[in-house]
């Protein structure tokens, strides 16, 4: 059966979108290609589906015209493979005697359009023009997104959600004042980036920025790291070395995870803040320093103070100004921007050209609860970029834990069951106590009640339920006092 009508298309201006013609026979493919060229589109002609797929994979074609009856398979099989390689590719299928049901089926499976033989060139030209316009819009949108990303990056922090914009505004207000700052937020939320932004926007931006993780060192090493030591002060001290406070004199010292610092080290740090002087380990000599101290923690320091695990006077010295960094779950709308930012970063690092994520993969990232926050998201994008073989990341490229549905993503009807209001209260208190590892002071603060109210609740539950059962059975041993 002929595939062309007697009326041939007239020659038009050259278009920018290259078309791959995949025909069942060379003669058919060349006939279609000749007429597509007359419409102004550059074409590549082949009868080999594997070659067409390879050119899609390499990004040479975003538009394919494929016949339904192919020598090495059918058009629907080719369509499925093409969409797996590039979910954004436009595939127009050409078939003979196709009822409306067949056309609908091809559209449902991802085809852009279905054209019947003999080809109506007027309709095909309109379809190609629509594809050209849509491709142009997509390219324009990508350009705008790249420009938007550059405007929404704040010293390495990316976001436009109200929660993160509040952080940006607070950093800009605080940075110009040379005073101590406390940054509070969950692990992996970007507290060090906030500290770096404070330094770069401060009057001492040209001075040094020193970083110390207080949870990574024992007291003796931490004291030496911060204040320095003299030769022979301890085993292994083969020479005299200045500490971070001397190194960053006139600049900024960032103490990460300060909530992990022992009470003894807290006392020594308090002296530095109050007197602006340090004393090297093993030396009686005092050195004056003038640094801006920025501290960060993922703990509730107010609860730590009440539990006598953090010095109250040091807390008030550090928290002259405080910045709360939101978790990723509190700024879920920033995930697409962050993914775009990390894709750009790791495409350059790994020499890849990954253009984005499939819609299914995007939905998985938006449903996930992200306990590791932005750091976990970056690790996922980094590892996925490294192993992904397609130009688009799909769910199968994600780590195993993201490929499994998480309980938080399940439908509410699957998790919900009717219980009494008192039971909901009991379950919630139990979970908060487990989260706080039995720390009643911290649990009461999270629950928004006083400690005495929580104690009375324990006694009431203990009185109503004899023995180890009831709420007390689920409370860590440290809380049962």
Image (cartoon, helix red, strand yellow):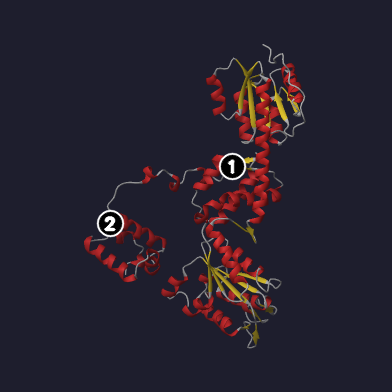
In this picture, is 227 found above or below 152? below
Determine which quarter of the picture holds residue 30: top right
Residue 12: x and y in percent read 76, 27
Of 28 and 24, the residue lying toward us: 28
Res 422 label: 2
Identify the element where label 1 is drawn: helix
The residue mark sitting in front, 1 or 2, is: 2
In this picture, is 32 found above or below 188? above
Q: Evaluate if marks 1 and 2 touch, with contact meaning CB atoms under 8 Å apart.
A: no
Q: Residue at x 65, y 56 (%)?
A: 151
Of 115 and 474, the residue lying toward us: 115
Mark 2 neighbour class, 10 Å CA radius: few under 14, some 14 to 19, many 20 or more: few
Name the side, left or right, on which 275 lies relative to 475. right
Res 397 label: 1
Residue 260: x and y in percent read 51, 70
Q: How many marks?
A: 2
Identify the element where label 2 is drawn: helix
Name the side, left or right, on which 345 lies relative to 334. right
Picture quarter with the N terminus: top right
Residue 259: x and y in percent read 51, 70
- Mark 1 and mark 2 lie on one chain; the one further toward the N terminus is 1
Residue 401: x and y in percent read 51, 46
**Can the viewer see residue 188 in this picture?**
no
Determine which quarter of the picture holds residue 150: bottom right
Q: Residue at x 66, y 32 (%)?
A: 131
Real-space CA distance between mark 1 and mark 2, rounded to the nearest whole angstrom: 44 Å
**Can the viewer see residue 146 in this picture?**
yes
Res 97 label: none
Picture quarter with the C terminus: bottom left
């Amino acid at each position: 059966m002929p595939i062309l009508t007697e009326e041939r298309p007239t020659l038009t201006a050259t278009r920018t979108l290259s078309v791959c013609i995949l025909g069942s026979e060379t003669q058919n493919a060349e006939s279609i290609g000749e007429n597509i060229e007359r419409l102004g589109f550059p074409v590549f002609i082949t009868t080999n589906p594997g070659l067409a797929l390879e050119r899609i994979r390499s990004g040479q074609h975003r538009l394919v015209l494929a016949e339904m009856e192919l020598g090495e398979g059918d058009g629907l099989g080719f369509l499925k493979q093409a969409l797996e390689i590039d979910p954004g590719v436009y595939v127009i299928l050409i078939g003979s005697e196709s009822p409306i049901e067949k056309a609908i089926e091809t559209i449902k499976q991802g085809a852009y359009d279905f054209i019947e033989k003999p080809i109506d060139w007027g309709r095909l030209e309109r379809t190609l023009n629509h594809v050209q316009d849509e491709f142009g819009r997509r390219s324009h949108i990508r350009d705008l997104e790249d420009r938007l990303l550059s405007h929404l990056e704040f010293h390495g922090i990316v976001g436009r959600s109200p929660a993160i914009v509040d952080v940006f505004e607070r950093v800009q207000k605080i940075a110009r004042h040379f005073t101590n700052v406390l940054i509070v937020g969950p692990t992996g939320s970007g507290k060090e980036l906030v500290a770096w932004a404070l330094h770069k926007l401060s009057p001492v931006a040209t001075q040094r920025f020193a970083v110390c993780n207080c949870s990574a060192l024992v007291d003796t090493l931490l004291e030496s790291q911060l204040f320095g030591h003299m030769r022979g002060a301890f085993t292994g001290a083969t020479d005299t070395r200045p500490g971070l406070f001397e190194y960053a004199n006139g600049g900024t010292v960032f103490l990460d995870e300060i909530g992990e610092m022992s009470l003894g080290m807290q006392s020594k740090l308090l002296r530095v803040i109050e007197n602006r002087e340090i004393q090297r380990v093993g030396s009686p000599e005092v050195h004056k320093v003038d640094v801006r101290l920025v501290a960060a923690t993922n703990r509730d320091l107010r609860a730590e103070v009440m539990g006598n695990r953090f010095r109250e006077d040091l807390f008030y010295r550090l928290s002259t100004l405080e910045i709360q960094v939101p978790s990723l779950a509190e700024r879920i709308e920033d995930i697409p921007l962050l993914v775009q930012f990390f894709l750009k970063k790791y495409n350059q690092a790994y020499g890849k050209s990954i253009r984005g994520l499939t819609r299914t993969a995007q939905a998985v990232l938006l449903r996930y609860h992200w306990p590791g926050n932005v750091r976990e998201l970056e690790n996922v994008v980094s590892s996925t970029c490294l192993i992904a073989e397609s130009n688009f990341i799909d769910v199968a490229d994600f780590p195993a834990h993201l490929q499994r549905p998480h309980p938080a993503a399940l439908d509410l009807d699957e998790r919900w069951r009717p219980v009494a209001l008192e039971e909901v209260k009991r379950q919630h208190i139990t979970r908060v106590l487990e989260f706080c590892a039995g720390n009643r002071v911290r649990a009461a603060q999270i629950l928004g009640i006083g400690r005495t109210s929580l104690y009375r609740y324990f006694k009431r539950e203990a009185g109503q339920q004899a023995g180890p059962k009831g709420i007390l059975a689920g409370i860590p041993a440290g809380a049962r006092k």
